[in-house]
Image (tube, rainbow, N blue to C red):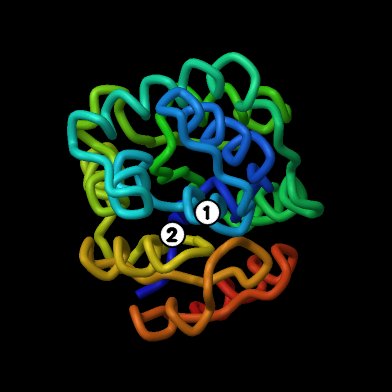
Amino acid sequence: MEIKAVLFDLDGTLIDSSEGIIKSARYALSHFGLEEPDTDKLYQFIGPPLSDSFRNIYGFSEEKAKEAVEVYRRRYNKTGIFECRLYPGVEECIKTLKRQGLRIGMASSKPEQSCRRILEHFGILDLFDEVVGATFDGTRDKKEEVLQEAFRRWEDLSLDQMCLIGDTVYDAKGAARAGISCIAVTYGFGDLEEMKKAGIAAVCEKIGELPALIERNL
């Protein structure tokens, strides 16, 4: 089936958001008297829902993780959100995909409002036909849940007409569970071998390669 719509992950796929995420994670941990000197460890916050990271990496209870997310967002929503950079070639890639007649969307585990603010900051919000993200109350935060909401908004399309572009195993697993294909980009924060094990349709080393890859129908 021909691909008619592309859903992009945000962190590690369209933007390098590491600075803002890492600084905001440190800020939240310091609230609980925890200092984390290992920056590599904090990179684990990029990709999964924040509450999962606080629980899985630092053993926080569900209640403590919820508080940590609130503290994290206190800094992130004010400062950290713009401590990021757009990867080179992203804007031209999306414009090329649109010229090819593809519908462009976003499916991110970052809060939807934050996604829109970032895209607007970089002047590319208008290139997106739909932006779907997590909810602040946590009722929609896992990739599969975000994708299901995207499907609801694009109910005129079948699953085999859509694909997700992402950089982590959370994207690959979320897409597999939701029933759509996933293209892995290698320049982000994830592990390609983990993504391959989770199941991906193709690999993209540079964002500029994506339009030709999709035009060949993977």
Would you identify the image quadrant in which residue 82 lies? Answer: top right
Give the residue drawn at x 26%, y 28%: 66
Q: Is residue 144 above or below residue 66?
A: below
What residue do we see at 53% from left, 63% from top? Answer: 167
Q: Counting residues from the N terminus, which is met first, the one under dot 1 or under dot 2?
A: 2
Identify which residue is drawn at 64% across, 68% down.
Answer: 210
Left or right: 15 in relation to 11: right
Q: Name the residue tied to disc 1.
A: 102
- The percent position of residue 74, horizontal first and vertical second, equals 48, 16
| Frontmost residue, 51 versus 162 | 51
- Residue on which disc 2 sits: 4
Residue 151 on image: x %, y %: 25, 47
Q: Which numbered disc covers residue 86?
A: none
Q: Quadrant of the N terminus?
A: bottom left
Per the model, the C-alpha gap separating discs 1 and 2 is: 5 Å
**SS label for mark 1:** loop
At numbered mark 2, what does the secondary structure look like: helix, strand or loop? loop
The answer to whether 75 appears left or right of 155 in the picture is right
Vertical position of residue 86 compared to residue 41: above or below? above
Specify the amino acid type for callout 1.
Answer: Leu
Instruction: State if disc 2 and disc 1 touch (CB < 8 Å).
Output: yes
Q: Residue 76, how many percent across, how many down?
A: 55, 24
Q: In which quarter of the image is residue 132?
A: top left
Residue for point 70% across, 47% down: 95
Residue type marked 2: Lys
Judge left or right: residue 170 versus residue 217. left
Mark 2 Cα within 10 Å, few/some/many (few <14, many 20+)? many
Q: Position of residue 65 (x, y in %)?
A: 28, 34
